[in-house]
Image (cartoon, helix red, strand yellow):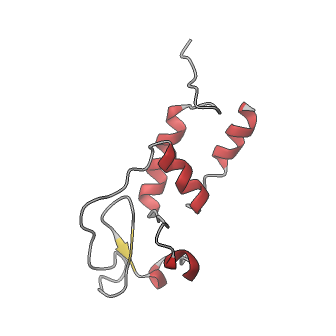
Amino acid sequence: MVEAYTAQLEQFDKPSPLVVTTLILSKSLQPWVHDTNTKCEVCNMGGELVSCSFCNVAYHNTCLSEPISKSLLASESYQWSCAECFKEAVRSHKRKKVLPGGGKRSRS
């Protein structure tokens, strides 16, 4: 079972809804509750922006290297993570060394 969990961690390469939910549940990602930027991080223009759910950055969907599908954008419950928040959350999640079932490894 530990091998399956470890293999799953190696698949944390893209912020899919399943991976983001896992990172939220492990408290490696914390929701952003403050205002977000009103200009795109790439083109510095305003308009219809996608905001990171975990920090203040925002992007036009067309400026993202991997645009978000229309169905996910339309979902009120979809939480999107920018690349920087995702990378830091994965690092944090891996440092916690949590075992399947919620137990933690002992340091012995």
- Percent across and percent down for residue 46 are 29, 86
Q: Is residue 73 above or below residue 13?
A: below
Q: Residue at x 47, y 65 (%)?
A: 80
- Percent across and percent down for residue 28 are 45, 45
Q: Residue at x 57, y 79 (%)?
A: 71
Q: Quadrant of residue 49?
A: bottom left
Residue 101 is left or right of residue 46, and the answer is right
> Split into 4 quadrants, where in the image is the N terminus?
top right
> Split into 4 quadrants, where in the image is the C terminus?
top right
Farthest front residue?
76
Residue 78 is left or right of residue 14, and the answer is left
- Percent across and percent down for residue 50 are 40, 76
Whether residue 65 is visible: no
Q: How many labels were placed on the picture?
A: 0
Whether residue 64 is visible: yes
- Percent across and percent down for residue 35 are 24, 67
Farthest top residue?
108
Q: Quadrant of residue 39?
A: bottom left
Q: Is residue 53 above or below residue 105?
A: below
Q: Residue at x 53, y 56 (%)?
A: 20
Q: Quadrant of residue 41?
A: bottom left
